[in-house]
Amino acid sequence: MADMRIVVVGAGGVGGYFGAKLSRAGEDVTFVARGAHLAAIQRDGLRVRSVIEGEFVAKPTAVDDVAGLASADAVLLCVKSFDTEDALARVRPVVGRDTPVLTLQNGIEGPERIEAALGAGHALGGAAYVFAAIDTPGVIVHRFAGRIALGELDGRATPRAERLRDALAHAGTPVELSTDIRRVMWEKYLLICAQAGMTALTRANTGVMRGLPETWRMYRTILEELAAVGARAGAGLPADVVDRIMKGAEALSAETTSSLHHDLVSGRRLELETLHGHAVRLGARLGVPTPTVFAVYAALKPWLNGPADGDTGRRG
């Protein structure tokens, strides 16, 4: 199989983990990164410490500016949702006429934002299922899961989507080419809103939440509200979607939390608007009540941009 020129925008937990595996497998991977993390990758490579796969070092190209690079065969968009437009502007020079841009971000708005910035036909829908994060500059720690679903927005099995699927599979990533990627993204959206919202709100891990009936009931209520929004939005969710996601949540490792929880306790900006904020606004537009999701959104909003005004105490 010929190497693909793959540009990964965002070298955090998701982009760093999957991009490092692609690089190790021989694909021509370029990371677009910044700051100390970029400098460490350029100097020492990108080290992945996985509790499942062991430790390895990839040696990808890493830049802060793609000017002068050849057009990419594919772009993986892995930045936080609030950095989307800036990231798309930065990567525009390597997006050719037929270059697909795969969103592996949280939320369901990625494809529309890609096409608004780069033009119709570039977006691939995607969902990444992985617990990974930057540990120190140049080092990604991978704790759990690690699969991807991707697909064309119209459900077709195109050569570009198949080629990217094959590259990911060759790199050892479990990957599914979906003919209904919007539904898949909605199902992940339900899970993330419950998992991220509840771990952040309670400052507790999955095991603690499962052990408290009231807390676990609230987790399910978030899913129920979002399933109702999805049904009104035409997301094509199956009738048993809440039961299926709860079954999956029961199987999560006890120590798992979420990137939202990690960002909250670390004093970082939160992806709250693309998760719970979007759900609240969409529910209001469609006439679907979302009181529990709204409660999570309102309670976390003081920390949207990092520590709340006057909050100097350590959280967590």
Image (cartoon, grey):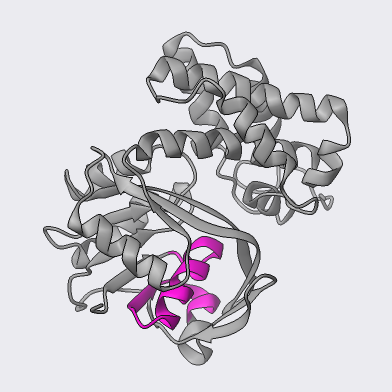
Q: Is residue 28 left or right of residue 58?
A: left
- Residue 275 at x, y = what percent? 53, 36
Q: Which residues are magenta?
A: 10-38
Up/down of 89 relative to 123, above or below: below
In the image, farthest residue toward the top: 287
Q: Is residue 156 left or right of residue 208?
A: left
Q: Is residue 85 visible?
A: yes
Q: Is residue 302 visible?
A: no
- Residue 50 at x, y = what percent? 65, 73
> Residue visible at 53% across and 90% down?
44
Q: Quadrant of residue 225?
A: top right
Up/down of 287 relative to 297, above or below: above
- Residue 109 at x, y = what percent? 38, 38
> Residue visible at 59% across and 40% down?
192
- Residue 301 at x, y = what percent? 64, 34
Asked whether 30 falls inside the magenta stretch, the response is yes
The one nearer the camera, 97 or 307, is 97
| The N terminus: image quadrant | bottom left
Asked whether 86 falls inside the magenta stretch, the response is no
Q: Is residue 51 left or right of residue 129?
A: right
> Residue visible at 52% across and 16% down?
228
